[in-house]
Image (spheres, rainbow, N blue to C red):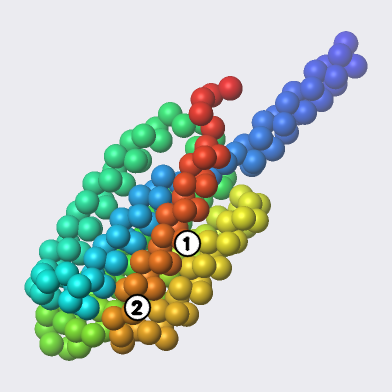
Amino acid sequence: MTTDRKTAANADLAYLREMAEAGARAPLLGGRFMAWWGGLTGTVAFTHWLIITGALDLGPQALWPLWLGYMVLGSAGSAVLGWSLRNKPGSGSMANRVQRTVWPVIGGMIGLYFAGLVVGMATGMVPGSLINTMMPIAFMAYGAGWMIDALLSRERLLLVPALVSLLACFACTVFVMTSWVYLIASAGMLLGTFIPGFFLMAREPREVI
């Protein structure tokens, strides 16, 4: 009887270990958010560049509605995408739980920096040109987020968007006081977030097994 109990206990432990390892290997589920924000931000940054270079004859007064609309549309899209993940398998894995925590924090930090710039400009304490610093700051944060994803999921390919984001941070810093910063930002978001986001989406489990 004792031997049978030990055998059953070992079988249970083996099963739990197998389930834990499977959960640790569960694909990341944040790809749709990356694709959404990468595509949207890349498009808006490119539109910003077209406006300030005169390619789009809308005038600088169009920039604030452009970015405010971006924030409203982006937030609404994120809410819909979050709802679409409610029954996705693998969402309880450690990597996915961390991802659900890290990326909203990153977004909140970027938003807080933007809000500080807006208040500073509105009160005359910050020159308007410093709004350009949003680009390198955002890429620095995105590079850190991708690096965390890569290390936790052990998916080495995710080091590529981390590197792209950090290189975009460097390039945006070099060109921060020129119009080129927005064109670089657009390319960086499309290459470093939009495309990798689709890669993650392709690896998501389709159904509960």
Is 137 on the left or on the right of 45, as rendered? right
Q: Residues within 10 Å of mark 1 (few under 14, many from 20)?
A: many
Q: Position of residue 29 (x, y in %)?
A: 48, 42
Q: Residues within 10 Å of mark 2 (few under 14, many from 20)?
A: many
Q: Which mark is residue 128?
A: none
Tell me, for residue 192, which label it has, or none: 1
**Do we see residue 64 in this rendering?**
yes
Q: Residue at x 58, y 62 (%)?
A: 160
Count how many numbered circles sit on residues in the image. Answer: 2
| Corner quadrant of residue 77 | top left
Vertical order, 151 against 130 (above or below) = above
Q: Is residue 92 among the parts visible in the rendering?
A: no
Residue placed under numbered mark 2 in the picture:
181
Residue most extreme to the front: 55
x and y, in percent, of residue 65 in the image: 13, 64
Residue at (40% x, 35% y) in the render = 85
Is the residue 16 above or below the residue 141 in the image?
Answer: above
The spot of residue 48 in percent (x, y) is 23, 70
Q: Position of residue 91 (x, y in %)?
A: 50, 37
Quadrant of the drawing holding the C terminus: top right
- Of the residues under marks 2 and 1, which one precedes in the sequence? 2
Quadrant location, the N terminus: top right
User: In the image, is residue 96 above or below residue 174?
Assistant: above
Residue 190 in which image quadrant: bottom left
Q: Secondary structure at mark 2?
A: helix
**Residue type at mark 2?**
Val
